[in-house]
Image: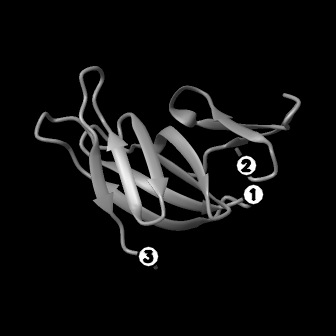
Amino acid sequence: MTGDGGLIAGNWSSRKLYVFDSAGKQLRVFANPSSDQFQDIKFADRQLIGSGNITKTTGAVEWYTWPEMKLVRSLRSGTTDRGRLYTAEGMAIQGNDLYLVPEDGPSRMFHFVIARR
C-alpha cells in the first residue's frame, strides 16, 4: 500500500512499476530507477522499500522517497550457505528489523537488525 490507500505492483523483475488507486484504477506506470530487480516491495515511514537481485551473487534492499523515487539508502546482500541470494524472495521490515525468506520451499527466515541513519 502506498500510504494513501493505493497499491504499487511490479512486472517480472519489477522493471516497470504500476500505481493503482484503491478502486483498482491504474494511475501511473514508471521505470524502476534501480538496477535492483525487486522481488518484494513494502512501504514504511513514507518510503518505498524494495529488495531483489542485482546479479546472481549480489542483492540489495533499497529505500526510496515516495512518490519521487529518489534513492535514500541501499544495503547490499550476498548469498546464504545454500548459495541463494538473501533478497531472492520475500521480505518484511518493521522498525530496525529486516526479515528475509530467500529460498523456494522449504525455506528459512533470516533476521537482520539494521542500523538507523
Q: Nearer the viewer, mark 3 or mark 1?
A: 3
The residue sitting at 25% across, 28% down in the picture is 107
Question: Viewed as shown, does residue 13 lie left or right of 80?
Answer: right
Q: Classify residue 81 by image quadrant.
A: top left
- Given the image, on which type of amino acid does mark 1 rest? Pro
The secondary structure type at the circle numbered 3 is loop
Residue 37: give x, y in percent of width and height.
47, 39
Nearest to N terminus: mark 3 or mark 1: 1
Q: Nearer the viewer, residue 107 or 77?
A: 107
- Pointers 1 and 2 in contact (C-beta within 8 Å): yes
The residue beneath circle 1 is 67
Above/below status of 5 relative to 13: below
Q: Residues within 10 Å of mark 3 (few under 14, many from 20)?
A: few
The secondary structure type at the circle numbered 2 is loop
Q: Nearer the viewer, residue 49 or 57?
A: 49
The label shown at residue 2 is 2
Q: Is residue 74 visible?
A: yes
Nearest to N terminus: mark 2 or mark 3: 2
The residue sitting at 24% across, 22% down in the picture is 106
- Given the image, on which type of amino acid does mark 2 rest? Thr
The residue beneath circle 3 is 116
